[in-house]
Image (cartoon, rainbow, N blue to C red):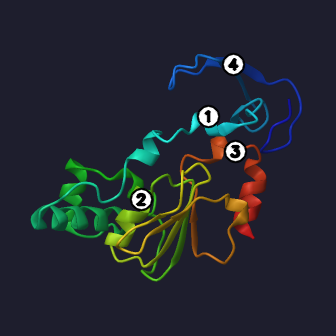
């Protein structure tokens, strides 16, 4: 087995794991690279679509599905602004009590402008991008090849049923949350991201 990240071929620690999320109960082999420590599936199934059905959790959590009253919307906005910008005492307190951990991943990005072009790869129905739109980020888009169809929301958010390698344009920020471990060519994906 050759590591998909560092290219090291050699003896690696292997693991056999049974799929339990959908109840297929089929066995998969994983290995931990003895050189870089990356844990990865040994062989990705030829057709991944059966593991991303229409009722997959990230497709069913539609953004904006909850109806918040004006006070809840304000508190959510303050909390989310704190998660991204790290500012605001009330937002900090709200975040501690009701964290939005998805947005916290952006907290280390200095000078992230509201007009930044942001792409979320493998975004499901786009909950994270929805939250960014509600904070005033206006140039957001998501792609996910396993969606049933393109999604377009009233606040301007677009989610496209498309492979990342088919996305054009330039982006100030490309997010790949909980996706790398599902890819056949993670290194190629990172190289495409850099381009």
The residue identified by callout 2 is: 128
Q: Position of residue 115 (x, y in %)?
A: 46, 83
Q: Quadrant of residue 15?
A: top right
Circle 4 or circle 1, nearest the eye: 1
Q: Secondary structure at mark 1?
A: helix
Disc ID at residue 15: 4
Cβ–Cβ under 8 Å for marks 2 and 4: no
**Residue 90 visible in the shown view:** no
3D distance between C-alphas at marks 1 and 3 = 15 Å
**Residue 193 visible in the shown view:** yes
Q: Quadrant of residue 88?
A: bottom left
Q: Position of residue 144 (x, y in %)?
A: 58, 55
Disc ID at residue 183: 3
The residue identified by callout 1 is: 50
Closer to the N terminus: mark 1 or mark 3? 1
Closer to the N terminus: mark 2 or mark 3? 2
């Amino acid at each position: 087995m050759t590591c998909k990240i560092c290219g090291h071929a050699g003896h690696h620690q292997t693991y056999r794991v049974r799929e339990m999320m959908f109840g297929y109960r089929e066995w998969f082999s994983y290995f931990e690279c003895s050189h870089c420590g990356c844990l990865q599936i040994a062989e990705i199934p030829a057709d991944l679509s059966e593991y991303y059905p229409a009722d997959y959790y990230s497709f069913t959590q539609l953004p904006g599905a909850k109806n918040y009253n004006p006070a809840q919307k304000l508190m959510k906005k303050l909390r989310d602004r704190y998660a991204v910008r790290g500012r605001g005492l009330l937002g900090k307190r709200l975040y501690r009590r009701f964290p939005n951990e998805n947005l916290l991943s952006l907290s280390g990005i200095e000078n992230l402008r509201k007009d930044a072009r942001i792409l979320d790869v493998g975004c499901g129905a786009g909950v994270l991008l929805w939250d960014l739109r509600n904070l005033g980020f206006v140039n957001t888009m998501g792609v996910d090849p396993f969606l049933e169809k393109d999604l377009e929301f009233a606040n301007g958010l677009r989610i496209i049923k498309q492979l990342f390698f088919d996305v054009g344009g330039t982006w100030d920020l490309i997010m790949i949350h909980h996706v790398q471990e599902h890819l056949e060519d993670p290194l190629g994906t990172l190289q495409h991201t850099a381009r």
